Image (cartoon, helix red, strand yellow):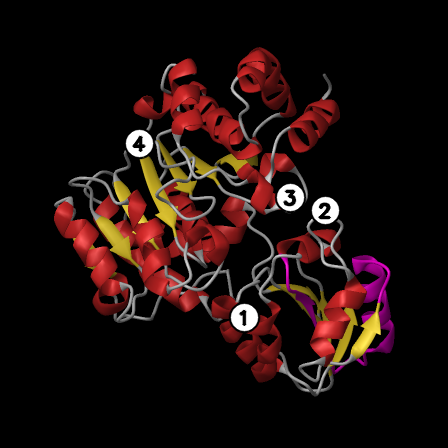
Amino acid sequence: MSYQETLDWMFSQLPMYQRQGASAYKKDLTNTLKLIAHLDHPERQLKTIHVAGTNGKGSTSSMIASVLQEAGYRVGLYTSPHLRDFRERIRIDGQEISEAFVCDFIAENKAFFEANDLSFFEMTVGMALTYFCQQKVDVVVVEVGMGGRLDSTNVITPLLSVITNIGMDHTSFLGHTLAEIAFEKAGIIKAGIPVVIGEYNAETQPVFLKRAVELHAPIYWASDLMKDNTHTSDLVGPYQLHNIKTVRQAVALLRDHFEITAEAEKNGLLNTAVNTHLEGRWQLLNQQPKVIADTAHNSHALKIVLNQVLHEQQGELFFVLGVVDDKDLASILPLFPKNAKYFFCKPQVPRGLAAAELARHAADFGLMGEVCVSVSAAYKSAVEQAQPQDLIYIGGSTFVVAEIL
C-alpha cells in the first residue's frame, strides 16, 4: 500500500478516538501487552520519560525533549493527536518518522493487527516504540494519549514519570471528579520511579501521595519546589509558566541520568518550537489583525487562555469556534465573552458538532454570531470583518486549529 492507502486503512478500519470518540476507547492493556510481545519488547531497549496530565502534556513533553536535544542527545518524541499529518506523532530530534517506515510497519504486522482487533492508538504505540528502538535513540519522551493507568503507552518503565495537572476532561472515561481523574493519571507512577507533579489541589494531592507511598516512588511537587520564574520559552501561551516549572523539576531529576548543563536547559526551553516543531499553542498567525490559534478545548485550559485573550484585546474580538460532539458545552461556553462576534463552524471529523447546533447552544449563553459552512469559511469571514486593531481567536478544538494551520 502507498502511504495514503496505509493511512486510510489505519483511520477507517480500526477505531481511532481522535476521529470517532467513545467507540474507539479501550479500557484495557491486554492488546498492547500482546502487541509488544509480538514486537519482541522494543520498550525494554529504551530509556523513557512518561508524561500525563489533563492539559500541558504535549507542551511539557516537547520542552523536555528540546532540553535533551540541546544537551546533545538523540531524542525520540511520541505525542498525540496530530494536527496535519500522522507522522507528527513520532519524531526524532524534531524530524518525523518516514512514510516508508509507516507503510512497512503496517504491512509487516497487518495480519497480527487484524487477528487481534487492535485499535489505531495501540498499533501507533507499537510503531513508535519499534521505530525508536531501531533508530537507536538515546532517550524517548512519551506523552500519554488519555488518562494513564489503562493508556496504551503505560507498558513502559520510565526513568521518570510526570503528571502536569488535573482538570475535568474525558469524564465519561476517566471519572466525574478530580480525584477520580487523578487516580487514572496516577496509574503511570511506577515502583521506585520518581514522579513530578506539576500542579495539584486539595482533591488531587492525596491521590498522588497515596499512590506514590504505596509504590515507594519519590514524589516532587514542581509548583512548590520551582519558585524561580526567570526561565522562559518560545512557547508563549500564558499557561506555559506552569509547564516550565514542571519541566525544570523534571530536568533536575534527569540530571541523575544525563549530562544537562544550565545552558542546555535554558536553550531547550527557548527553542522548543524550533527543535520539536510543536504547533497550535498560542500560535500567532497574523499581526494586523492579530490572529491567535490555540488547541485549548476544556474548561481548565480555556479559563487561562481566554483570560489572556481579554488581556491582549485592543479592538473588537472575533472567535472562530468549533467543537466535537462529546464536548461538555455547559462547562466551556460560559467562559467565553459575550461582547464578541462568533463564527461557528464544524471541524471536518466524524465527531465534529454541527455549526448550527453549536450556535444554538452558544445563544443560551449570550454568544451570538454567524453559522459558517466550514472552518476555512469561518476564518475568511472573520478576517474580512476584522479591522487591523482587532483580535481573532481560533479554537475550541484541536481539529479547528488543524484546518487553519
Describe the element under mark 4 as helix, strand or loop: loop
The answer for how far apart the CA atoms under marks 4 and 1 are is: 34 Å
Q: Residues within 10 Å of mark 1 (few under 14, many from 20)?
A: many
Range of residues picked out in magenta: 372-397
Query: Which residue lies under the disc numbered 3?
Result: 20
> Going from the N terminus, do you reach mark 3 or mark 1 first?
3
Q: Nearer the viewer, mark 4 or mark 2?
A: 2
The answer for how far apart the CA atoms under marks 2 and 3 are is: 6 Å
The answer for how far apart the CA atoms under marks 1 and 2 are is: 23 Å
Measured as percent of width and height from the top left, residue 119 is found at: 55, 30
Query: Which residue lies under the disc numbered 2?
Result: 350
Q: In the image, is 164 to the left or to the right of 369? A: left
> Going from the N terminus, do you reach mark 4 or mark 2 first?
4
> Going from the N terminus, do you reach mark 1 or mark 2 first?
1
- Where residue 47 is drawn, which disc sits there? 4
The reply to whether the magenta stretch includes residue 390 is yes
